[in-house]
Amino acid sequence: MTHNLRVFVASPGDVPLEREALPRVVDEFNMSIGPLSDCRLEVIRSETHATPDAGRPQAVINNQLSDYDIFIGIMWRRFGTPTGLAGSGTEEEYRIAFERWNINPELVLMFYFCEAPFYPRSVDELEQMRHVLLFRKELEGKALTWTYNTSISFEADIRKHLSVRIPRLLQDKHTTSRSRAKPTDESVRVFADLWDRMSPDLQRAFNVAYNENRLAGDPGIQTRDLFAAMLRVNSPSLRQIVDEIPPAALPAPTPGTVIDTTYIVAERPWLSGCVASSVKRLSKVLPHDQQLTAADVFADIAKNGSGKSVVLLREHNIGPSEIDRILKQKGVQVIGN
């Protein structure tokens, strides 16, 4: 059975290249990934799917284009024209989508903001931009927001995001209950308390790992996700360790464009048992005058963890004694060792 998923696009009129890019990306998906996943996408846009009717114009669009599985919002410098119920049609469409998401979390809700520079030439343009910035501030923390600089980078980003998100959406539609981990009050508290004592490289690794899964609709971090993000961040001390480990014992670095905006502290992430235990264990022994680094966490999990990523290390003869040997050989000092 082929699953037909409808992608609704909401935006003011100043991002036509992005709106034109979406059908191209969807056509590529339908020709390549779609047949393998028994899935077909359809782009829903007011300029192609709405028909004339009586009533408030935005209400007509809302009624005719209300059936969709993925909502994609785009804004740059214009907010749009008031509709009578919201500051613009895009805002009204987003609020309807957000209400639907509250009822049905399987709805995919993503919003993109262009950061291409421009100089306002009138008070009206300046006011439009002010509304965009206020709206963006409101959305951060409520929906996955993403930034881009050109229509070309937008096209690359949306191609990746749809490829990542759709398998999760199909999985959710096939299962009546979700098996994803649940955050605990203790793990959330310990992680948040430790955040400001983490080094920038470790913070970035956690951000990348969390945001990749957040994008896929599963806001948490497995050990494999964190290891892949650590390898992407590529901190010097960690590199000295992993250079001594067979590549087959490690995941590939997180690929493609990534976002390292800090959502994880303001939200309630779930952490795998290995990651949660390591964070808790290291928080108890971290000296007050030191920062926790990616090398600290990697070495601790590699020595004390028990999940699939640690089992993979063991299969390649990377156990606690081998980690200790590498640390001594390379002169890498880690906390808790």
Image (tube, rainbow, N blue to C red):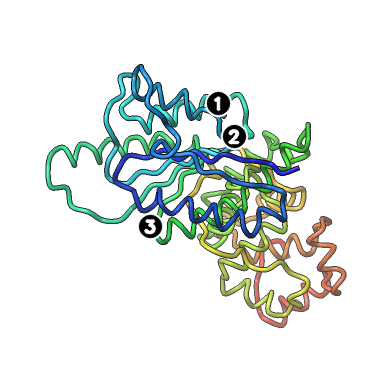
Where does label 1 land, which residue? 100
- Report whether 336 appears left or right of 159: right
Task: Compare marks 1 and 3 and give the one earlier in the sequence.
Answer: 1
Looking at the image, which is closer to me, 308 or 2? 2
Q: Secondary structure at mark 3?
A: helix
Q: Position of residue 189 (x, y in %)?
A: 62, 38
Tell me the amino acid under the disc marked 2.
Answer: Leu
Q: Is residue 68 above or below residue 219?
A: above
Q: Which residue is mark 2?
A: 107
**Picture quarter containing residue 328?**
bottom right
Instruction: Name the residue beneath numbered marker 3.
Output: 151
User: Please, what secondary structure does the residue beneath circle 1 have?
Assistant: helix
Q: Residue at x 78, y 36 (%)?
A: 175
Q: Nearer the viewer, residue 78 or 237?
A: 78
Badge 2 or badge 1: first in the primary sequence? 1
| Image position, residue 159 (x, y; %) | 53, 56
Relative to 48, residue 104 above or below: above
Residue at screen point 27% across, 41% down = 78
Q: Alpha-carbon neighbours of circle 3 within 10 Å: few (<14), some, or many (≥20)? A: some
Q: Residue at x 43, y 56 (%)?
A: 154
Q: Which amino acid type corresponds to the residue marked 3 in the rendered image?
A: Ser
Q: What percent of the width, then of the height, locates residue 188? A: 64, 39
Neighbour class for label 2 at 10 Å: few (<14), some, many (≥20)?
some
* On-image quarter of the C terminus: bottom right
Q: Amino acid at mark 1?
A: Arg
Q: Quadrant of the N terminus?
A: top right
Question: In the displayed image of the protein, which residue is found farthest to the bottom?
Answer: 329
